[in-house]
Amino acid sequence: MFALDTNTVSFLLRGEGRVAERLIETDPAKVAIPTVVLHELRYGLLRMSPAAAAARRREHLEQFIGCITILPLDERSAAEAAAIRVELERLGTPIGPFDVLIAGTARAHGATLVTHNTREFGRIEGLVVEDWYS
């Protein structure tokens, strides 16, 4: 399974990079987004202007999420996120709180995290990361 990070879905909605091409090649049953990513995307759209552009992207987002799985931030995800946070803090390389939750969700569900932010997420032990942008 592939869990798409916020930047990957944003690239898809804006038609940037090779994200759409990679998605076409991937079985939709194997594509998901963590709940935290859905939050970030909807928040970003609510802040976006002009309203017409936001409405088009919101429509595309709703169509997209209707075809994929939403990975819940459940008990296993919370436990994985906590473990990731502690480990990165011990190493002196913490990441943001939403990114910790996204990584924890992906790792708990055995998903490959698809992100353009491989430098940050690549430091997390046991998390498989891919970049579909290029």
Image (cartoon, rainbow, N blue to C red):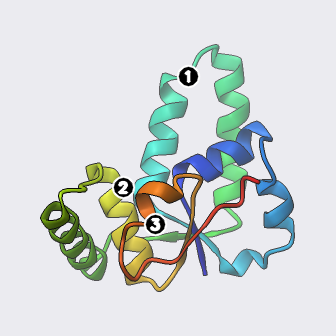
User: Relative to residue 106, is residue 37 depicted above or below?
Assistant: above
Q: Measuring from the top left, give residue 11's x and y in whole percent.
A: 69, 44
> Upstream in the sequence, badge 2 or badge 1?
1
Seen in the image, is 45 located left or right of residue 34? right
Which residue does the numbered mark 1 point to in the structure image?
A: 48
Q: Residue 2, labelled with which disc?
A: none
Q: Measuring from the top left, give residue 44's x and y in whole percent.
A: 50, 33
Q: Measuring from the top left, give residue 30's x and y in whole percent.
A: 67, 80
> Upstream in the sequence, badge 1 or badge 3?
1
* Near-viewer residue (128 or 65): 128
Seen in the image, is 76 located left or right of residue 115? left
Amino acid tagged 2: Asp
Which residue does the numbered mark 3 point to in the structure image?
A: 122
> Upstream in the sequence, badge 3 or badge 2?
2
Q: CA distance from mark 2 to mark 1?
A: 21 Å
Label 3 crowd (10 A; few <14 / some 14-19 / many >=20): some
User: Could you tell me if residue 53 is visible in this image?
Assistant: yes
For the point 16% across and 61% down, which residue is it? 89
Q: Are the residues tagged 1 and 3 within 8 Å (C-beta)? A: no
Number of marks: 3
Is label 3 or label 2 in front? 3
Label 2 crowd (10 A; few <14 / some 14-19 / many >=20): some
Q: Measuring from the top left, give residue 64's x and y in whole percent.
A: 70, 56
Seen in the image, is 13 located left or right of residue 94? right
Q: CA distance from mark 1 to mark 3?
A: 29 Å
Is label 2 or label 1 in front? 2
Residue 15's image quarter? top right
Which residue does the numbered mark 2 point to in the structure image?
A: 99
Label 1 crowd (10 A; few <14 / some 14-19 / many >=20): some
* Near-viewer residue (5 or 35): 5
* Near-viewer residue (92 or 59): 92
